[in-house]
Image: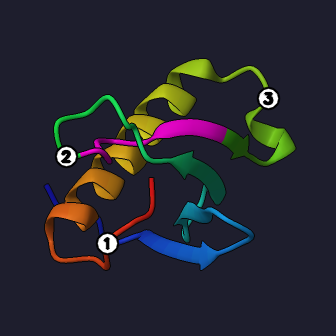
Amino acid sequence: MNFPHFVRIDRDGRGRGRHYVVHTHDPKFTLELTPDTDAPDKIGKGVLKRVCVPNSWAGDYGKYAKMITAAQEFFAQSNAAGAPPKRA
């Protein structure tokens, strides 16, 4: 699967890192994810912690679901592609 409009941002914080997936084209949105410790690789597709979307998306849940699923797939594949190891 091709993910040309997604960017992953990892930030180290106090005790735990934060992981974000940003969709850079319309509709712009950001997901904050935490690694899924129950997944076999201890990261998986991530567990949604926060979703930030534009007000114009309020109520269009079908569009949300497709884009969030794609963002989580991107997160999972970016881990498999040799991204730096994450803290659980």
Query: How far apart are the alpha carbons under marks 2 and 1?
Result: 11 Å
Instruction: State the residue position of label 3.
Output: 58
Residue type at the position of mark 1: Pro
- Using the image as rendered, state which of residue 39 and residue 81 is in the foreground: 39
Q: Where is residue 67 in the image (x, y as percent from the top left)?
A: 46, 41
Magenta stretch holds residue 46: yes
Image position of 25 (left or right of 82): right
Q: Give the range drawn in magenta.
A: 42-49
Residue 63: which numbered mark, if any?
none
What count of labels does the image hold? 3
Asked if residue 56 is positioned above or below residue 29 in the image, the reply reads above
- Mark 3 vs mark 2: in front: 2
At a point 48% along the width and 27% down the height, the residue shown is 65
Asked if residue 16 is positioned above or below residue 24 in the image, the reply reads above
Please tell me in which quadrant of the rendered image residue 61 appears.
top right
Residue 41: which numbered mark, if any?
2
Q: How crowded is mark 3: few (under 14 residues within 10 Å), some or many (20 or more)?
A: few
Asked if residue 17 is positioned above or below residue 30 in the image, the reply reads below
Q: Residues within 10 Å of mark 2 (few under 14, many from 20)?
A: few
Q: Disc 1 or 3, which lies upstream in sequence? A: 3
Instruction: State the residue position of label 1.
Output: 85
Q: Disc 3 or 2, which lies upstream in sequence? A: 2
At a point 17% along the width and 36% down the height, the residue shown is 40
SS label for mark 3: loop
SS label for mark 2: loop
Q: How crowded is mark 1: few (under 14 residues within 10 Å), some or many (20 or more)?
A: few
